[in-house]
Amino acid sequence: MTNLSLTCDGLDARTSTTFKPTRMVNLGYVGRDQAAVRAHLDELAHEGVPPPVSVPLFIPLPLHVLTTDQNIQVVGPSTSGEAEVVFLIDGPSIFIGIGSDHTDRALEKTSMAMSKAVCPNIIGTTVWKIEDVSDSWDDLILRSFVRRQPGDAEIPYQRSPLGTMMSASALIEFAARRLPADGRKGLVLYSGTIPTLTDGFVYGCEFRAELVDPRRGRVLSCSYQVQRVANQWDEVPALSQRA
């Protein structure tokens, strides 16, 4: 991944900034309320996803899946987005953005790590300084919307205040304990997501995630189109069915 060219929407000015990623980690099952965590695990179990070995989940991912593109390609027919806060950490300097941990739900049933690695991690190009929202962190709202087919209306897909998740400092400290001494330099950290509002996953053609600051009337947004690559293997009968 090359450097990220970003716009920092500060409280006093908008400035251009550059962030050089050196490693990326996706977290999961980060609910502050363990009942909510269990609800999310039940949601995944309903989709055939086995429970994790431990929570929170810590998944290092290759940087080549990180993108700011608004058009992504996937292979599997069952992929969906996840709204997540993205921490861009370079030592003491921390920006926060909004992104989506796009996931292959069929592959997730056998390998959580691989289900993330075969799909892009999308991030919006506008960020905030973490200190600008630290006093209202729990009140920030994470939400997402999905469109099933072109021309369809958007479906409200996720919505929850960040107070339902582990605090920003807890998330960062949890990740830092599992990284080498220089692990905070160039770290891209995806926060983990929140449960869906729908009955199960929606495999749509368009996904939009937002982080809303209701106190200051500001919104970070990330949206993208999903195109499935034609796969010749879809037409090949299973080996067990061959004569």
Image: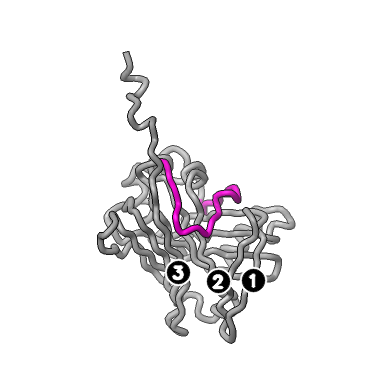
Please give the name of the residue rendered at 61% of the width and 65% of the height, measured from the top-left corner: 5
Nearer the observer, 200 or 227 = 227
The answer, for residue 76, to whether it is visible in the render is yes
Q: Of callouts 2 and 3, which one flags the residue occurring earlier in the amino acid sequence?
A: 2
Q: Does the magenta stretch include residue 74?
A: yes
Nearer the observer, 90 or 232 = 232
The segment highlighted magenta reads 55-75
Q: What residue type is labelled 2?
A: Val
Please give the name of the residue rendered at 38% of the width and 59% of the height, measured from the top-left corner: 207
Q: Are marks 2 and 3 in contact (CB under 8 Å)?
A: no
Please give the name of the residue rendered at 52% of the width and 51% of the height, measured from the top-left corner: 57
Q: What element carries label 2?
A: strand
- Measured as percent of width and height from the top left, residue 16 is found at 62, 74
Q: Which amino acid does label 3 sit on?
A: Ser
Please give the name of the residue rendered at 37% of the width and 49% of the height, measured from the top-left corner: 44
Q: In this view, does 115 lie to the left or right of 2?
A: left
Classify residue 232 by image quadrant.
top left
Classify residue 81 by image quadrant.
bottom left
Q: Are marks 1 and 2 in contact (CB under 8 Å)?
A: yes
Mark 2: few/some/many CA within 10 Å (<14, 14-19, 20+): many
Q: Which residue in the protein does label 3 denote?
A: 221
Q: Which residue in the protein does label 2 denote?
A: 127
